[in-house]
Image: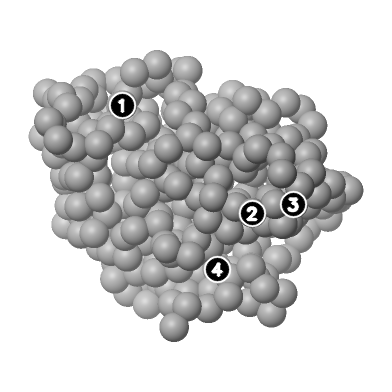
Amino acid sequence: MRRTFLGAGLALLLATTGCAGTDAAPPAPAGAEAPAASRQNADEVGRTLASLRKVDKLPLYEMTYVGRYDATVGTDAKPAGPFGCSLFAASGDPARPLFARNFDWDANPAMVLRADPPDGYASVSLVDLSYLGVGKDPTGDRRLLDAPLLPFDGMNERGLAVGLAADDKATVTPVPGRPTVGSVRILRLVLDRAATVDEAVAVFGRHNLDFDGGPPLHYLLADAAGRSAVVEFVDGTMRVQRGEGRWQALTNVPVVGVAEKQRRADRRYGAIAAALERSGARVDAPAALRILDQVRQGHTRWSVTYELRSGEVRVVTATGKQRRYRLPMS
């Protein structure tokens, strides 16, 4: 049975820490054209835009997308430079597997997005709003309706999490017959369609990725059963490095075919690895945020933890404010 994700009773439970809000966006005019990806009626468009709230001076916004979208069409905005990100999955406590990441990038507005598509899994994700072309005041901006298409990390109701990081050596050789999607868009397809790491890898395997116009990327996946995997593109071919122990980490150094000693020469990867080994990869959200704090950079925009069984999400922005959410799990 699907649960109602957007209703008042079963919406994400929110706990704030001293954050202010803004006025709601006005409903969209009836009959106004929505972005190509939107499959909403006028009422759903209005409810989506009216849900926008500013909750942090980053600025960080929240929005709940209501209705259908087509994850295969619409905005294909591409990142313009490298992402200096740090990610890890930890399952030392089998009852509390966790996914965590720092997003290190330009000083752009961000959004926590709730989505519950009728033909996919409910999810919570984080979006860099600059890639939607949205300005400093996004109130009422219909380009927000494309926000589901550009998650930079996220978790769905089955406990499947995914995030990206730059990998300058990655290259993609298109496979004939496979549809091509943007290098960020693939995260939306994974969140909508995959319940496990194996299913997420299969989603990647059914698509060609487009790295043109932005940095090549690699990806970390983790699920509620404690499994994880890194997806990379080596010499044009998709390769998968499965997690073999209690943790797996990813920064901006390749993983596939690279010795662990060489990976640890990267300062951030080495610090994460050392911290997870000391703890036996048994880390709760506060401990994970402390690890992320060790490897944060001057341009870290947000740190986030996803608890893959409880559905709890904690987001800490560059302002130092923390917000908590809970995604109902199925």
CA separation, marks 4 and 2?
A: 25 Å
- Precedes in sequence: disc 4 or disc 2: 2
User: Is residue 4 rendered to the left or right of residue 198?
Assistant: right
Q: Please, which residue is most extreme toward the front here?
A: 31
Image check: 126 left or right of 87?
right
Q: Which mark is residue 327?
A: 4
Residue 125 marker: none
Nearer-the-camera pick, 53 or 107? 53
Residue ID at (19%, 31%): 233
Q: Amino acid at mark 4?
A: Leu
Q: CA distance from mark 3 to mark 1?
A: 32 Å
Q: Is residue 81 at all visible to an observer of this figure?
A: yes
In this rendered view, identify the residue nearer to me: 91 or 38: 38
Q: Is residue 179 left or right of residue 238?
A: right
Q: Decide which of tag 1 and tag 2 comes sooner along the chain.
A: 2
**Label 4: how many Cα within 10 Å (few below 14, some 14–19, many 20+):** many
Residue carrying label 1: 210
In the rendered view, would you say 284 is above or below 82?
below
Which residue is at the front of the view, 8 or 60?
Answer: 8
Residue 105, image x, y percentages = 54, 27
Q: CA distance from mark 3 to mark 2?
A: 9 Å
**Residue underneath mark 2:** 41
Report helix, strand or loop for mark 2. Answer: loop
